[in-house]
Image: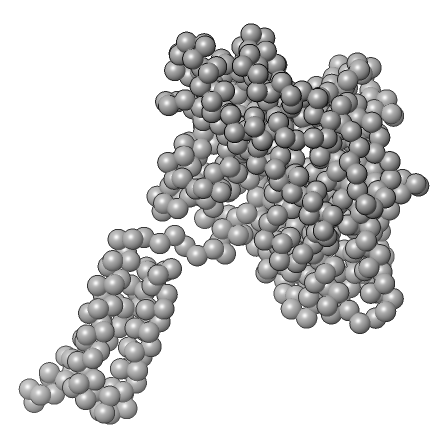
Amino acid sequence: MRIKPRQELLDIWSATAKVAFAPVPGAKGKGEWRWGGRDGSNSISDAEQLLCLMLPATEIPQFQLDEPNSTDEDLLKVLRPFGGAIDIPQFLIGLVMDYLDRYTASDGTPIFSGGSYFSALVPGEEPTAEQRELPVVESFAASIPLMLSSLGFIKVFSRSVTRPELRARLEQVEKAASRRLSAAMIGLLRSFSILVFPDDSDYAAALLRTVNQNGEPRRRVIEDLRVSLREVAAGLRDLTFGLTQVEQIEREDMLFECGWSWGVHSNATPVEFPVDLGQQTPGLALDAPYLYFTVVALDAIADLYNDRTRLLRLLDDDQLKLSSALRLRWDLTQRYWSTVASFGTKRWPLEDIPWRTVDGVESDYFSLLVTSIAARHLSGRPNDSDLQRLGEILAELANRSRMTRRPLREDPALQLHSPGVSIEVEGATDFSPRLSWVAADFAPLLLKRAAMVAGLVNRIDLRGDALNLADDLWDHVAQRRTIVDDEPGLWDDPSQVYPLPSGDQRISWHHTVRVVESLVLAARLADDQPLRSEPLLGHALSLLAEADHLYSQELLAGTSESGTPERKRLEAVRQRIRRAREIMPARPGTAVSLLLTALGDLDSLVASRDTTEVF
């Protein structure tokens, strides 16, 4: 793997400290944190800005900052503007508290507005102030990993805190973070949507055109698809929270989709919760799934039951109930989209690029989103054959997006990167002006999924292919950094690699956090044990048997009773054989290297004894 996640993350932290923090001269750890970037300051962008620091600090053991006595020196060096080892955790907790204050209304209701991430669908128009205040799934989703990382950070840091005033402050931040986490989970519950439509509708025609890759009769495809989705439909039928169409889901003349709308939808009912979280306002979003927001929600929900969340017990009993409800929707949605993506016996619908949504819109970006769902679904039951097909789809998307191929003149594929894919966000009543959500993070998202697939593959050759793709994508993404003080900074400037007009040089925290997420995955992959080669393991076992036998012969020959040099060499042989036996199941290649050295030393002992006997 050519990606160097440690160094790259250190560079990102260093650049973040330069662009987002204005230190007070001569006052260590004192300064002003500058919220906002290219997309202004809003509940999403500011969360992403914090996650660029918090994700590595809580997801990678080598980057931990919550235990001051064990913080690595190179981490302290790049974060020196924030103070020393004891100051840095307090500074980060202060930023979290500032974020919570900024996005909590005067009546205590957490704010999840889209802000400047909303744009007008028609060029020249501007969203109204009321539209920018609309709560959106991306904000719910961004708050979940931020609050979880903050709660975990506080829980670990508090173990080394003795000052009463600091402990009281930590408890205050912990309570506020837990409150926002609960509100975000409820927001996602109220944004989950099921769209049921007749099998003779335009929606059904688009879905059937996508899944029917073998040219089967229409009625047969409908029946087979309904059978494949029978368990999903049964699970969805038992859900509540304002899902008005759920009773029609198992009708023989209906098909359906499930996932997340862009916000709390118009049919959502309030969710009862024992803690007062402020107002649960009526939803305005269209009661239908959006592929983009579905993937965003699925990624966030996965953090609710990862190892760190469970081991640190970051969720209380009431939150565990919310998490269980979200997990059920997560499972059903994963299964639905994975079934549709791989439907049939020959070519997958997902392999028919670009993906077409039921409303007739198609884009390579949507193919990447569906691939993201399929990859995560396979993480529960890794299958190298399926993962190989996903890897080939990602490689094809890299080619089509001109990330691994030279672009044509005025290549339409470059629109994926700038200005991006515009997604109309519709309401239960017509918005004026009509609203759009622009997705321009194709490059870092593709890198993230390639790193994810590489971590799932269990065959050495396939992992090599996946890593090569991830390396090629990283080479592309790394060149798209903006320039800060004549040095590579953060993301994203596609004009660095494409014949595009020079764009906004301000930092996009949305792009940068996607890169950070990719590097966190790469760091986990580097920290894992290498894949084991079964042929190499057999070879190592044969070498071990021979080395053991020859070592026993040397003991029998009395070499251990000989002079000091021979005894030392024989002891070194023993240590190598012991070490090889210990690591062989996980690292047979290293074991082979140790055993070859041991066999060479044993042969030298035999040869020297034979020479002595001759004379």
Task: State the residue at coordinates (79%, 42%).
Answer: 273
Quadrant in which the C terminus is drawn: bottom left
Task: State the residue at coordinates (70%, 19%).
Answer: 424
- Residue 578 in picture, x, y percent from top left: 33, 74
Look at the picture and state if 396 lies above or below 510.
Answer: above
- Residue 201 in picture, x, y percent from top left: 59, 8
Task: State the residue at coordinates (37%, 23%).
Answer: 345
- Residue 20 in picture, x, y percent from top left: 77, 47
Total tally of numbered discs in the picture: 0
Query: Which of the pair 265/93 is nearer the observer?
Result: 265
Q: Quadrant of residue 89?
A: bottom right
Query: Which of the pair 441/281 is nearer the observer?
Result: 281
Residue 283 appears anywhere in the view: yes
From the viewer's perspective, tell me whether residue 545 is left or right of residue 276: left
From the viewer's perspective, tell me whether residue 553 is left or right of residue 346: left
Residue 504 appears anywhere in the view: no
Look at the picture and state if 539 lies above or below 202.
Answer: below
